[in-house]
Amino acid sequence: MTASVHLATGAASALFVQNYLSAKYDWQYDIGRRYLLGFVAGLLSHIVFDAFPHAEYSLHGEALMAVLCLEGVVMMAVIPGWQGPVMAQLLTWGMIGAALPDAFYFVGRYFDIEWLKQAHSLLHVFHGKVLFIYSSHPIQAMIAIAAVIYVRIKSA
Ligand SMILES: [Zn+2]
């Protein structure tokens, strides 16, 4: 999946799992656990969504980095942007969790760090494993938009 889908579904997952935390995890006093759960949910969402065969970037090198940064900036604006500090952090933790598996790849390759490259491979063992479904770029864009809408409505 492309960056926007991962970031948007990561934030949506971080928000979604909060429904399953009992009310005793007070939004004021136990917020750390909610952030941690959001981060884990974001990470898992990356593995789940990458399991679907999907269109990849045709760009490489600096052009790819520029697109990734642009997607990151846009998603930061439309997801945690204009949120209260607690919600903004929760959504950002989900996005960090969702970005991490692929960040491992880029950082590991750039700095030639073997364990990061291995962590990336490990997190992608299910990559493209769900057959019969193919997520093209337009479908990925629609998933990203749907996830952003879900976050904006649910966090309001
Ligand atoms: Zn990935």
Image (tube, helix red, strand yellow):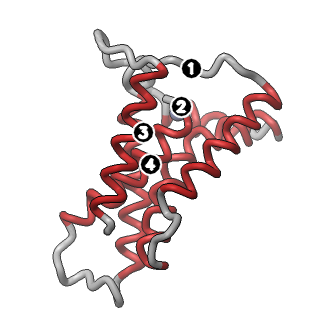
Q: Residues within 10 Å of mark 4 (few under 14, many from 20)?
A: many
Residue name at image x 49 percent, y 29 percent: 1
Between marks 4 and 2, how big is the CA–CA gap?
15 Å
Q: Earlier in the sequence, mark 3 or mark 4?
A: 4
Toward the viewer: 85 or 25?
85
Question: For the residue labelled by badge 1, is the local secondary structure a helix, a strand or a loop?
Answer: loop
Residue located 76% across and 33% down the image: 109
Sequence-wise, which precedes: disc 1 or disc 2? Answer: 2
Q: Mark 4 and mark 1 in contact (Cβ < 8 Å)?
A: no
Q: Earlier in the sequence, mark 1 or mark 4?
A: 4
**Residue at mark 4:** 43
Q: Earlier in the sequence, mark 2 or mark 3?
A: 2
Distance from disc 1 to disc 2, alpha carbons, whole Å, reads 7 Å
CB under 8 Å between discs 1 and 2:
yes
Which residue in the protein does label 2 denote? 2
Structural distance between the alpha carbons of marks 3 and 1: 15 Å
Are there few (<14), some (14-19), or many (20+) residues within 10 Å of tag 3?
A: many
Marks 3 and 1, the one that precedes in the sequence: 1
Image quarter hosting the C terminus: bottom left
Left or right: 85, with 118 as reference point: left
Residue type for callout 1 = Glu
Task: Identify which residue, 82 or 38, lies in the foreground.
Answer: 82
The picture places residue 74, in percent across and down from the top left corner, at: 59, 49
**Pointer 1: what residue?**
56
Q: Amino acid at mark 4?
A: Leu
Asked whether the residues under the numbered discs 4 and 2 touch, taking CB atoms below 8 Å apart as contact, a structural biologist would say no
Distance, label 3 to label 4, CA atoms, is: 16 Å
- CA separation in Å, label 2 and label 3: 9 Å
User: Residue 94 appears at what percent x and percent y?
Assistant: 45, 57
Which callout, 3 or 1, points to the residue nearer the camera? 3
Front position among marks 1 and 4: 1
Instruction: Name the residue tied to disc 3.
Output: 144
